[in-house]
Image (cartoon, rainbow, N blue to C red):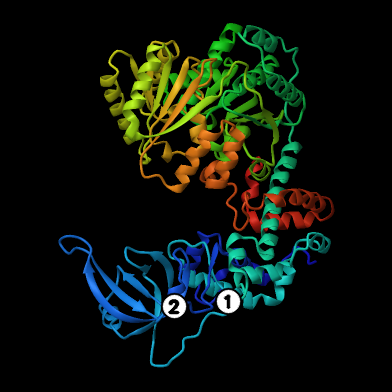
Amino acid sequence: MAKPSEKPALSQSITTLKGVGPRVGEKLKNLKIETLQDVLFHLPLRYEDRTRVQPVGGLQPGHSAVIDVEINHAEIVFTRKGRSRRMLLCHVSDGTGHLLLRFFYFNKTQQQQLTAGTRLRCFGDVRLGASSLEITHPEYSLIHNQQTTSLENNLTPVYPACDGVSQFLLRRLSDQVLALLDNQLAELELLPDMVLKKFALPSLKQSLKTVHRPAADIDLNLMDQGLHPAQQRLAMEELLAQHLSLQDLRKNNRRHQAIALQSDNQLQNQFIKSLPFKLTGAQQKVQQIILADLKKNQPMMRLIQGDVGSGKTIVAILACLKAIEAGYQAAIMAPTEILAEQHFNFACQCLQPLGLKIAWLSGKLKSKQRREMLQLIASGEASLVVGTHALFQDEVVFHRLALIVIDEQHRFGVHQRLALRNKGADKTGVPHQLIMTATPIPRSLAMTAYGDLEHSIIDELPPGRTPVKTIVLSEDRRGDVIERVQQACRENKQVYWVCTLVEESEALQCQAAEDTQKLLQQALSEFTIGLVHGRMKPAEKQQVMGDFKQGKIQLLVATTVIEVGVDVPNASLMIIENAERLGLSQLHQLRGRVGRGSQASHCVLMYKKPLSQQAKARLAIMRETNDGFEISRRDLQIRGPGEVLGTKQTGLLQLRIADIVRDEHLLDEVKQLGEVLQQQYPRQVKALIRRWLGDAQQYGHIG
């Protein structure tokens, strides 16, 4: 096995390659391609079979194919009234079947070439048209006389691309690099020989060649599924690099000092006695684990998972009381104004009777209020600080911050979370961190995205909770749904009506909620109907939510701002409009706002026809189960980790070839292999992380 050091050729700039000048080089940087080695590890997404000509009569919709055909008839048609858009349609055949070639964009030369009797070799994606199979904008070349056009020798890779970087360019670059570095590919091997033998893995050189240029006779279905041994070998290495990076973060975290929080727990005991209920066994167990963490002089980095309604906030408040009683400050950060407000109100309700002062900080505070809050925080007069991402802005200075609680961590970027930790760092050490999520995380996602954190699960709901029954109805049944709402309100139950829109515009969503409230007020004039949306002022939202909780409002119309944090035990019916537009986790979070009391609760998912197959699957899952972990696992299968975690925000799990759902079976081996490398081959560890993650692993280090 070669040492992880690289010969100069591997680290050479891509501008040394033919056809790559400074402008192209800049565009390739968008794909993180800057060196020759980067080209090798810019891996294909899928493959096209251009190695054989297929008969038209055997083509299947949804597949790409090479065909040799003759044009029987060509015509120009106009697609809109006023003859504003034209198309060139070529009706072709090869003796086994007929096909339509459709061109939306064409020039005069093409129009003159593509006439009856012209023979073509075409490649494109086959789809089912109105009356026959079609290929839109095929790649094509003219076949002259008896000339034979050569076919590809390998399957054709399709790479991740960007504006200004074509597939043709990426294929040409990988051709050049594979030829140029052929003798050096073996030196890129970072896995020990014993590992390759133990797991029967092909070499890196063989894997890279196979993945970039699969042989014509290779199993295309296996390649498309990512299950070929060459792909699995690279997937294992990528997951290994991800795992090692997170382990490196954990190790780095342990190097820092934290404040060992010592107290006699009087505040905690006083708070627990004031609660109108007993803590569940799961809450007590997790509380004891957190207390043990906080007594250490190493910073706690613990992820608390708990399904909606499991009581994570109580556990977080208990942790904050430990820090406060020890003479320090605690902070709670939430991703949205409404959730942060609810944490603030709950904290005030719980902690002000204990004589504690709580500061509130958000981006919407007026200048005078903001100055007052900043003074309370800096002086240490405020024991607990609650807010949104405004907590980690430069002007916020903590007096003695010892604990940070972060709710719904996956909505924050890793950099944001660590910026807050860095803000609390001083000579005595860094703050402890407690991270909460009501999105249950499947094992595969937990291992690959949160491997730097210790995990605890609150897997028990408070006694007396009844499972929510979920009903799926078409919006055609809106009248029946309104009658159901009317009946619930007459029985002194409370109801949520949630409005959603495809549009990202918050203004449009709020408008939809306002319109819905007016329509429902007309239909249900005997009841008080409230409205909550993201563009209301915090005080207005707080007033409406307070009135709803006190029972002054029977029906609350809202956007998805009520997704998390709202606790109204008497609310037992929820209507979600356009439910087909929401992901499983969001639907589950919304549904969790009902069923928080002892009475039977229902959630009606109203959808608009027609439903896609994916939407049907999501709604069926919601009807089948209330288990948050099962829902999250199915959500991961449908949407993938990037959507579930919010990859754009986290910067994590932008995997090149691995798939954590498909490759979950590799994770135990990855963990074992990681231990071997850390103990016996530490230089390989750094090289692997650098190869697959670049500088991304640096996000956990304090500057």
On the question of residue 554 being in view, the answer is no
Q: In the picture, residue 70 is in which quadrant?
A: bottom left
- Which residue is found at the position 75% from the left and 48% from the top? 668
Q: Would residue 33 be found to the left or right of residue 87 on screen?
A: right
- Which residue is found at the position 41% from the left and 27% from the top? 575
- Say which mark, if any, is on residue 154: 1
Q: Residue furthest left?
A: 82
Q: What secondary structure is marked by label 2?
A: strand
Could you tell me residue 288's position as x and y percent? 74, 21
Q: In the picture, residue 474 is in which quadrant?
A: top left
- Which residue is found at the position 58% from the left and 40% from the top? 415
Residue 183 in the image: above or below residue 685: below
What residue is pinned by disc 2? 67
Q: Would residue 492 be found to the left or right of residue 621 on screen?
A: left
Give the residue type at disc 2.
Ile
Could you tell me residue 196's position as x and y percent? 79, 62
Could you tell me residue 317's position as x and y percent? 62, 19
Determine crowd level at label 1: few under 14, some 14-19, many 20+ residues with C-alpha closer than 10 A: some
Q: What secondary structure is marked by label 1?
A: loop
On the question of residue 565 being in view, the answer is yes
- Nearer to us of marks 2 and 1 is 2
Badge 2 or badge 1: first in the primary sequence: 2
Give the residue type at disc 1.
Asn
